[in-house]
Amino acid sequence: MALHRLASITIGVPNVEETSAYYAEFGLSRDGTTFSTSDAGEQLRIVENPCRRLIEMSIGVDDPDDLDRANKRLTRLGTTVQRDPVSVSAVEVHSGARVEMKVLPRISQDPAVMEPYNGPGRPDRQNARAPGILREAPIRPCKLGHVVIGTPDAEASQRFFVDGVGFKVSDQVRGAAAFMRCSTDHHNLLLQPSPVAFLHHTSWQVEDVDEVGRGAMRMLEGHPERHIWGLGRHFIGSNFFWYLRDPAGNFSEYYSDMDTITDDQLWTPGTWEPSLRALYAWGPDVPPSMLEPEDLADLMAATHQG
Ligand SMILES: [Fe+2]
């Protein structure tokens, strides 16, 4: 049948304990250095690595035929593939990320309650305060949505993920980024050209825009230095976003209301020229660190030592 979900990721950082404490505070359920979301189980593992980067991503497929097809496609690209009865894996050499595909059940999420929103001539919530202002519970991300990595050869990396693994391109920005999906989410992976491989950000789904705001504000209490960019709404993908920085320098995003593509025939992939417009519909100015990591020199030094 097909690839159907981004199941989990392993990220490498030099400061495992400090970074783990951050993701527990971010709202993921912690068990040592493994973290779970409310709807999709274990989705993040943090391991020690001299520089921050994506070590591995795991992708769910429907059946062993999908594994056979992926094996064939990757082999045709000249990639070394490991195949066992339940999985196929290969390393994307430019980003250094290992990609594992395995047969997994599809994710099933209980529908979130649609809370009433008032609009002009549409007073759907009458004689009551908005539920979003009354919430007190800690933020619990529902699932891992996407991961964005820097790669020194974005074209070759994209060939690996699209022609090899089987991702589909939802939209692209010419010469800058391809938004790729392995599920019905608009994107689960984005590649950013960069002199060195690094992890740009991971993104975690929350219920709605109030949870994006609540989550970020709680993370910023006593830690204003964590703020990167938000609140805003992306143009490509449509999602509300707020980006924060973890202690290793990776960004973590709360998002809600991303486009979903359930029928490939009904979605027309777009190509945009590089512009801020392609990046966001509204929000604060884009900070330079979104476009180029502040620790680029350190990343390059660590990579070349490694
Ligand atoms: Fe994102």
Image: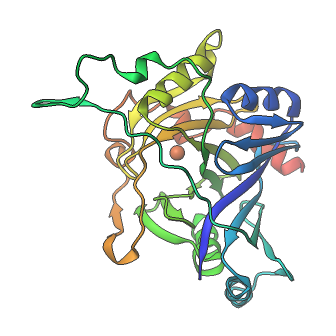
Q: Position of residue 214 (x, y in %)?
A: 51, 22
Q: Quadrant of residue 182?
A: bottom right
Point 76% across, 72% down: residue? 102
Q: Judge whether 82 appears above or below 285 on screen.
A: below
Q: Judge whether 174 appears above or below 103 on screen.
A: above
Q: Judge whether 86 appears above or below 112 on screen.
A: below
- Nearer to me, 104 or 278: 104
- Nearer to me, 281 or 154: 281
Quadrant where the image shows the N terminus: bottom right
Q: Position of residue 154 (x, y in %)?
A: 59, 64
Q: Position of residue 18 (x, y in %)?
A: 83, 26
Q: Quadrant of residue 282?
A: top left
- Nearer to me, 85 or 83: 85
Check the image and name the residue furthest to the left. Answer: 121
In the figure, is residue 114 to the left or right of 35?
A: left
Point 35% across, 21% down: residue? 130
Q: Judge whether 145 appears above or below 100 on screen.
A: above
In the figure, is residue 41 to the left or right of 180?
A: right
